[in-house]
Amino acid sequence: MNSPIFIDANVFVYSVGRDHLLKEHSKRVLALVPDHVGFFTDAEVFQELLHRYLALRTWEKMRASFSNFLDLMKGRTEAISVEDVERAARLATTYPSLSARDLIHVGVIQRVGATRIVSADADFDVVGSLERLDPLQVDEWRSLVSGN
């Protein structure tokens, strides 16, 4: 079985946002989720999205899309534990360039035993134990998840 694959918040953001080079690629990533049991995310991703849309005052416009993403990731969303936060704090010394949110994601990814993340955020490239799958290259890496 393939290693679980974490989906970062930016995949969702680009999939529902304004026209952008990553929009259609991100939609194709999310279209893979129903057919691959290994995709997952964490509760921090949803907190990031909620924070973003409230801060931008676009919550009413984005609420339905947010709800659809929640439904898509139902049963695929890891909770954040105090151990994940402790792991993130330890990782901050090794990866000082990563944000607190990204460190939380890495902590969860490590706990789950995953080695891949779908993200447009190249900051994750500094994590040697993690392979970043760029949404722009979904057609190149989709065989990793589909077996084709």
Image (tube, grey):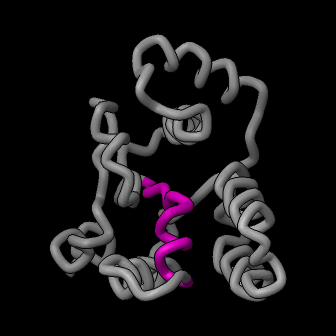
Could you say which quadrant of the image residue 114 lies in? top left
Count of all numbered marks drawn on residues in the image: 0
Residue 33 lies, in percent from the top left, at: 49, 78
Please name whichever residue, 74 or 24, is drawn nearer the observer in this view of the structure.
24
Residue extending furthest right?
60
Q: Is residue 139 magenta?
A: no
Residue 140 lies, in percent from the top left, at: 16, 73
Residue 61 lies, in percent from the top left, at: 76, 87
Q: Is any part of residue 101 visible from this angle?
A: yes
Q: Is any part of residue 1 visible from this angle?
A: no
Q: Is residue 13 magenta?
A: yes
Could you say which quadrant of the image residue 12 lies in? bottom right
Q: Is residue 61 above or below residue 117?
A: below
Please name whichever residue, 66 or 58, is drawn nearer the observer in this view of the structure.
58
Residue 102 lies, in percent from the top left, at: 53, 39
Left or right of residue 87, residue 51 in this image = right
Residue extending furthest left?
140
Image point 48% across, 55% down: which residue? 6
Left or right of residue 43, residue 127 in this image = left
Range covered by the magenta-colored residues:
4-16
